[in-house]
Image (cartoon, rainbow, N blue to C red):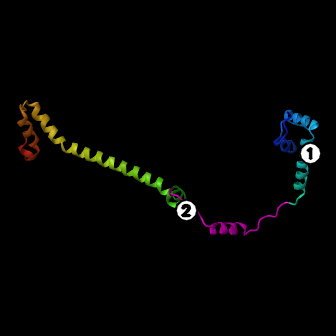
Amino acid sequence: MTRHLDQELTALLDGALPPARAREVEQHLAGCASCRAERDRLAHAVQLLAALPPPPAPSPDFSRGFYARLDAEPTARAGVLELLRRARWRNLVPIAGGALTLALVVGALASYRAEQARLARGLDLYQDYELVAGLDAVQDPEDVLVVGHLDELPAGARP
């Protein structure tokens, strides 16, 4: 059973077939009258199309009129995803993400600074504890409470 050529005829006429495949198609055409008739019909159509004048250039107002008609067409009800895709504010999503990131960074820095300030307030107590502990005066938990309140003493009354 001989296979007839379909798409190869157009490719042959366009010169788009590789040389080896073009020879095979030509060999088939030599023995197949129906494929030769189809090739001749396609070749005639290509000649007629080539003889046509070029299409006229669109008028300067073509785009304006085309888009006006397009805008006048009724549109189907858009789904949520389509509305999000069309929305001009969709550019706000990256901006909102950046703002959220900035807020998190600022919050983390504020928390860090608050922790550092809390530690700094306790440095005096730590220094007093070091002083008292160095004198072997801290014997029980009550002594630790006393050291904790040393900063409340007037500056001249500290040990």
The residue segment tinted magenta is 54-80
Secondary structure found at label 1: helix
Work out which quarter of the rendered image holds the N terminus and state it.
top right
Left-right relation of 67 to 122? right
Instruction: For marks 2 and 1, give the one nearer the viewer.
Output: 1
| The magenta stretch spans residue 55 | yes
Residue type marked 2? Arg
Q: Amino acid at mark 1?
A: Ala
Residue shown at the point (61%, 67%) measured from the top left: 74
Q: Which mark is residue 139?
A: none
In the picture, residue 82 is in which quadrant? bottom right
| Quadrant (top left/top right/bottom left/bottom right) for the C terminus | top left
Instruction: Tell me what residue is drawn at x 66 percent, y 69 percent.
Output: 68
User: Is the residue marked by circle 1 packed among few (<14), some (14-19), or many (20+) residues within 10 Å?
Assistant: few
**Residue carrying label 1:** 37
Query: In the depicted view, which residue is nearer to us: 41 or 66?
Result: 41
Q: Can see residue 156?
A: yes
* Mark 2 Cα-neighbour bin, 10 Å: few <14, some 14–19, many ≥20: few
Residue pointed to by mark 2: 77
Q: Nearer the viewer, residue 48 or 64?
A: 48
**What's the CA distance linking mark 2 and mark 1?**
51 Å
In the rendered image, residue 121, in percent from the top left (x then y), is placed at 19, 45
Would residue 12 be found to the left or right of residue 142 on screen?
right
